[in-house]
Amino acid sequence: MNQNIPQTLKGFRDFLPATMAVRNYVKNVFIEVFKVYGFQPLETPSVEYASTLMGKYGDEADKLVYSFEDQGGRKVGLRYDLTVPTSKVLAIYPELPKPFKRYQIQPVWRAEKPQKGRYREVLQCDIDTFGSSSPFADAEIIAVIYTALEKLNFKKYSIRLNSRKVLQDLLDKSGIINNQNTVLQSLDKYQKIGKEGVIKELVSKDIPQDQIDQLFNYLKTAQPDENLKTVFTAIDQLGVPQNKYVFDPTMVRGLDYYTGTIFETYVEEPKIGSVTGGGRYDNLVKTLGGPDIPAVGTTLGLDRIVDCIIELNLLPNLSLNSTTVLVANFGPETINQSLKLVSDLRQSNIAASFYFDNEKLGKQFKYADSLGIKYVAIIGPDEAINNQVTLKNLTTGNQITIPQSEIQNNLL
């Protein structure tokens, strides 16, 4: 028995054409928005030195980095995110004009337990601004998130903002001095497990009950710091409605490199976790051996966003196939004219496909319909003699016979 059963590695996915149509559409929307806001493209290698990646995210995230030794005995790893590799670029090329605004769309890998909305390979779509400490740079990132989600027809979502400085103040007031990171790790799960779940976890970590009580008392009255207030004002001026964002003092963002403003976006349905996440990280470039360059940015989680679009049918009119017309194969007698027709259509930037095998027209119609191709063009013996083509609209069932020179005018 053949034991070589084809299968995809757990946590990884194959994307068939229908899904790829949505993914490509979303990616193109992102790029369009990024360019409008003045961001430039950048790419970095899939593999980095382990020393570049490790120690930047926190103990829990470091465990999820795919790390290994290459054939040269070097300790390397697959990138966990795009922020650290890009900060490495700024450390290597400090002469880049500042502020340096870049967008980057590339896969990242995380060795975590797969579940809905959480995969081991995801395509991250990042924007970052390097070289400015201004709260207006933070606000612009929020405006990009809002613009992109609106263009994708998202309606029920909330951009939640907080600040690491607000969180530090909460910890200090609560008397939590020695276990700050572990407390923040638990608070970071607030959206998933709720208040009672966080309290239970803090108790299991031997955090004194009075400190836990103080923390949640201060959370009730927490207010944005002055920098965050300026960010909110700038967000308003950039056209983001106030019902699309909210101050959330329980939001942490678990990665260690954040230093100031932090933000995440949640959709009401489906329950899939955050679809964007980011913040300010003013020390990362310096940590990687570069100059002291402040930075702020976000990831727009294409995989989760596409999952939401498909589940909620947010793009009902999206064409799943870009091909406009299938040129049928009527047989050897007219094959040359059919090939010339498909070539002419392509030279005119009309997406055209040719049916390679000489099979019954009914089967060719069925094939075109299965792919969502609207038109089938047929050149039979009569059409060939008269330099004509029969054009069938598979949506309406209507067909017309016209001069071949007029086909482009009839492909609407």
Image (cartoon, rainbow, N blue to C red):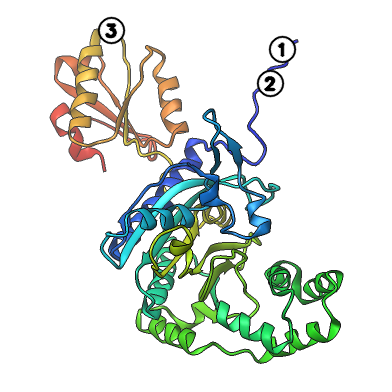
- The amino acid pointed to by label 1 is Asn
Which comes before the other along the chain, label 3 or label 2? 2
For badge 2, the amino acid type reads Ile
Q: Which one is in front, 247 or 204?
A: 204
Q: Amino acid at mark 3?
A: Pro
- Above or below, 111 against 158 in this view is above
Q: CA distance from mark 1 to mark 3?
A: 41 Å
Q: Note whether 316 is above or below 157 in the view shown.
A: above
- Structural distance between the alpha carbons of marks 2 and 1: 7 Å
Question: Residue 278 at x, y = what percent?
Answer: 51, 66
Q: Are marks 2 and 1 in contact (CB under 8 Å)?
A: yes
- Is 41 left, or right, of 408 in this rendering? right
Residue 390 in picture, x, y percent from top left: 26, 26
Number of the label disc, if any, that sits on residue 332: 3
Residue drawn at (37%, 79%) of the image = 134
Q: Residue 330, located in which quarter of the rendered image?
A: top left
Residue position for label 1: 2
Image point (41%, 87%), residue name: 233
Locate residue 56, reporting x and y percent: 56, 58
Q: Secondary structure at mark 2?
A: loop
One can see residue 375 in this view: yes
Indicate the position of residue 231 as horizontal and vertical percent values. 43, 82
- Kindly tell me whether residue 402 is visible in this rendering: no
Circle nearer the viewer, 3 or 2 = 2
Please, what secondary structure does the residue beneath circle 1 have? loop
Question: Mark 2 = which residue?
Answer: 5
Quarter the C terminus occupies: top left
Q: CA distance from mark 3 to mark 2?
A: 41 Å
